[in-house]
Image (spheres, helix red, strand yellow):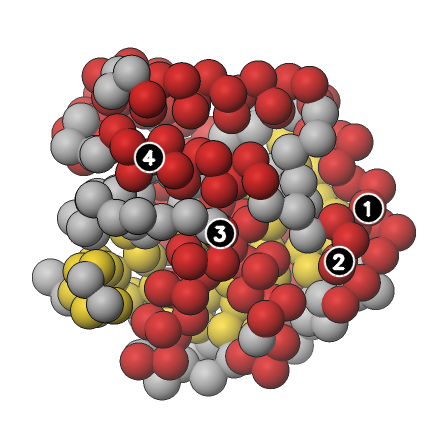
Amino acid sequence: MPYFQYGDVNLYYEVHGEGMPIVFCHPPVMGHLTFRFQRPLAKSYQLIFVDLLDSGRTTRVHPVSSVTDLMEMVHALVVDLKLGPVILCGYSNGGAIPQEFALQYPDQTAGVILIGGFPEVSTFLLKKEFELGIWAARKQLLNLFSLMLPAAHFNSHTCRRDMANFIKQADGPTLQRIYEAGMKYVSTDRLQHITAPLLLIYGARDLYMRSYLLPYCQKVKDIDIAFVSNVAHQVPTKRPDECNQIIDSWIKRKSLA
């Protein structure tokens, strides 16, 4: 099992396949198992799955304070692996890391894929979701996270169990800081500086995310948008075949591979 040492953090990662590298960034505490159904893409691309801070097999206790802190860990791994320009794929709250990476390191960004992504937490429902995460982490309700997140994303008992086992081991205070960092993150006023091609993927039933489309459409020059039918937010796990096909088609159409 490969680890990358970043300061006092042991960052667990996996590499599958060859070709254009795609780095996957998951939401808080869910780990790389979030993207277990994206592995078929390894037939055409090099996939880098990372357990971000306080997730999976990576170090749990850490005084993280910002999305930039998390992004720098990912960037350091990209440099260490000598990957060159990469495509970054972020799901939900994990999408803040690819956005910041693209803004800070444009020359190392070949493309950005956001699945259920947003540039800031500004709507009522999303604010409440983050506030609930912060409260539950502060109260050390890790069993609650281990029940709700896997159940929301997977139908398989095995998939739920695998993710739940990792979530139960998380550090509450670190998870609270990660949620707080995500709630503070804003890229809206800088989106015009994203020069890499951007692909937005949303579930057709994910209605409360629709308002976040506008700033991307207004400010990002090279943008594509795809809606996946019969699913709300959990596109990578509930509609993986469609999700993977959209990603593959976009990369080929943009000649990024």
Residue 118 in the image, given as x and y percentages of width and height = 65, 41
Q: In the rendered view, would you say 105 is above or below 184? A: below
Residue 60 in the image, given as x and y percentages of width and height = 20, 44
Q: Is residue 1 left or right of residue 164?
A: left
Crowd around label 4: few <14 · some 14–19 · many ≥20 (10 Å): many
Q: Disc 4 designates what residue?
A: 175
Identify the amino acid type marked 1: Pro
Q: Is residue 159 left or right of residue 195?
A: left
Identify the amino acid type marked 2: Leu
Identify the amino acid type marked 4: Leu
- Quick check: marks 2 and 3 in contact, CB under 8 Å? no
Q: Disc 3 designates what residue?
A: 67
Q: Disc 2 designates what residue?
A: 191
Q: Which of the two marks, 4 or 1, is nearer to us in this view? A: 4
Tell me the quadrant of the picture where the N terminus can be found. bottom left
Q: Can residue 151 be seen from the camera position used here?
A: no
- Pick whichever, 101 or 232, lies toward us: 101
- Pick whichever, 43 or 133, lies toward us: 133
Q: Earlier in the sequence, mark 4 or mark 2?
A: 4
Q: Earlier in the sequence, mark 2 or mark 1?
A: 2
State the image quarter where residue 8 is shown. bottom left
Q: Disc 1 designates what residue?
A: 215
